[in-house]
Amino acid sequence: MQVPTHSLKESIKVAAPGRICLFGDHQDYLGLPVIACAINRYIYLNARINNNKMLRIHMPDIKTERVIDLQKPLLPANSRDYFISAIKVLQDIGCTIDVGYDVQISGDIPINAGLSSSSALVVAWITFLLDAFGAGTKVTPELIARLAYRTEVLEYNEPGGLMDQYTISIGNLLFINTVDGSHKIINKELESLIVGESGIPKQTLGTLKNLRDVALQAISSVQAEVKDFKIENSTVDDYAKLKHHVPEDLQPVFYAAINNYAITKEAFQALNNAEIDLDKIGNLMTMHHDILKDVLKITVPLIDYMINAALSAGAYGAKIVGSGGGGSIAALSSKENEEKVIKAMLEAGAKSAYKVRIVGGVHVI
């Protein structure tokens, strides 16, 4: 085995959780806050040092191998090679990656299901590299979140916000300011949180880009007439007052931006009450979903069937998870009704349904 120029670990194991957005879907790219949580579904990364300057990455879940020769120029293998972009981003903070590892990445976060498996992979990869090679600064969950956001979004000018990377890195139930990443951990239990997978792949980039672009156009059309208008200062009354400044075809996305923001703020207040009202939280989840379904139109029939089934089985509330066009739903239930809700989702056509727990963020095992 080669002798490294600095002390390296023989083996490293990392676990990065999935995430659920409870409030604020299609809001973070507008700079509006979100409420999201990390859940006990994980991407696992296992690495062992080798005797060459190769990063050999084996991903059995998707039957893919990736080899990065550290002695050659770092050229991306495809249009969104997060392995390479992460290395380049880390080099900027003094992380020198000069020794090879054999890496296996697998997990139980379903792929293309709206639970952020891709961001969990990026966060796990960055955490491994920082643990193996160090950096020129103190490593914190917030640093990992910022680096992952840059790696996945900024480096490729993608339309998403920073919710996924921050929730997965920091963990717990979070209220996130998506302008600067500042956040507050909400120390509340949500009793029974249930995920139902539709089995229909979500449509991330196209859906996000289209809705982001038209939402920004709608906001800009108001600002052209009302110079001091800021979406972050809006209230639900502003829609009726200002919609005449918005082209008719853009009015639905303007309505969604204002009302989903109001729902997120109300949910944050409700979650911070001394006594949590799960029925109210559930109702707000369903209200949020109804806007995503009826106004932004990001659902598909199976998602709608699953939502209706969960509510009919006694769930406090339910909503689509992820960018839309498929993916999963999340339902909030009492412990007494959780088995009924799971059964109802499956009978409505869900590929899978199961209870999840809110957990901490990425960690070295």
Image: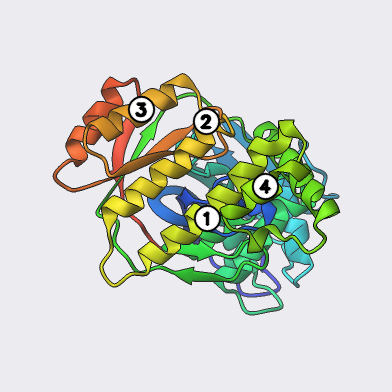
Q: Are marks 1 and 4 in contact (CB under 8 Å)?
A: no
Tell us which disc is closer to us: 3 or 2.
2
Mark pair 3, 4: CA separation: 26 Å
Q: Is residue 22 left or right of residue 90?
A: left
> How far, Cα to Cα, is label 3 from label 1?
25 Å
Can you say whether 271 is above or below 206 in the image? below
Badge 1 element: helix
Residue 258, percent across and down? 60, 50
Which secondary structure lies at badge 3? helix
How packed mark 2 is, by other alpha carbons closer than 10 Å (few <14, some 14-19, many 20 or more), is few
State which mark lies toward you, 1 or 4.
Answer: 1
- The residue indicated by pointer 3 is 306
Q: Is the residue marked by circle 3 packed among few (<14), some (14-19), or many (20+) residues within 10 Å?
A: many
Q: Earlier in the sequence, mark 3 or mark 1?
A: 1
Q: Report the residue marked by disc 4.
A: 160
User: Residue flagged by tag 1: what amino acid is it?
Assistant: Ala
Residue 277 in percent (x, y) is at: 27, 59
